[in-house]
Amino acid sequence: VQQKNIDVISDNITNTSTPGYRVKRAEFKEILNEQAKYQSTQKAIGYGVKIAKITTMALPDDVNPFGISIDEKGFFMVEDAQRERSYTKNGDFKLLKQNNDYFLATKNNEFVLDANGKKIALDPDPEKLVISENTLYPNGNNGEDGISLAVVKFENMAALGRKSGDSFTETQNSGTPQPLSSPKVIFNYYDQLSPLVSTNQINEITKMVQTQMAYQISSKVLQAADEMEGMTNHLRY
């Protein structure tokens, strides 16, 4: 069990700098004791512990796995419940549940649109989500077609109308929205996790030392038990 725990911690240390990697923990479970009858009394004979499961640790509350940044010229295209379109630079997105589906949305509950002007349905678990340029890959960048975000620009950004909060609307003076070629889009999820790297490294190294000590103590106990059983087997009357 301790050897497996060391393997899990070693994997954490190896991947502390891997973008999007989430720390894992080995959870232990006591093996059921067996009730043995000895001289009219019940004795519990234990068989140690085992690995119950390997758990992926939850993200810190201040990390948004759907946070996206955009360059100074670009705007995300969004749509409210009345299907009125607007534009925003704020990529602090979230998932909004509608019926049994989850859609990428702004904090103001406006749906983020893809390049075809459609809402973007995503899995509620963001662990596999990858973004490359302005394309989302819900199941990781494994060769499948991704979902391109609608990123647009205006000839006269200063003439955009204010809708509410950080949303803007096009006006006659701003011009119509035009697709922005090669937009600089950054998946903030990785950037938000990067400050945790050094903290995770220290924590994992500390846990590694503790686990190695537990492993050594367990090995010595097992060795002592073997020696005692060996002595018992060689006893002669």
Image (cartoon, rainbow, N blue to C red):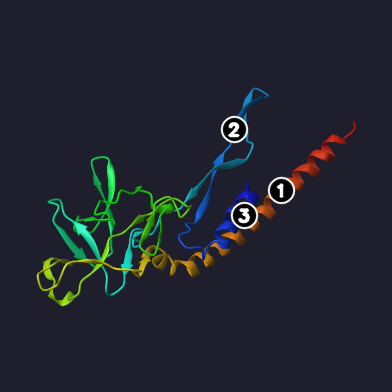
Mark 3 or 2: in front is 3
Q: Which residue is mark 2?
A: 33
Residue at which label 1 appears: 221
The residue shown at (75%, 43%) is 225
- The relative height of residue 129 versus residue 89 in the rendered view (above or below) is above
In the image, residue 226 above or below residue 3: above
Residue farthest right in this picture: 236
Q: Is residue 133 left or right of residue 8?
A: left
Query: Residue 95, position in %: x, y?
Result: 28, 52
Counting every numbered tag in the picture gives 3
Residue at 15% over, 51% down? 81
**Quick check: 40 left or right of 144?**
right
Amino acid type indicated by mark 1: Val
**x then y, percent, for residue 113:** 25, 56
Q: Which of the pair 118/166 is nearer the observer?
A: 118
Mark 2 or mark 1: name the one nearer the start of the chain: 2
**In this figure, which residue is indicated by the disc labeled 3?**
6
Q: Secondary structure at mark 1?
A: helix
Residue in the image at 12% along x and 75% along y: 159
Q: Amino acid at mark 2?
A: Asn
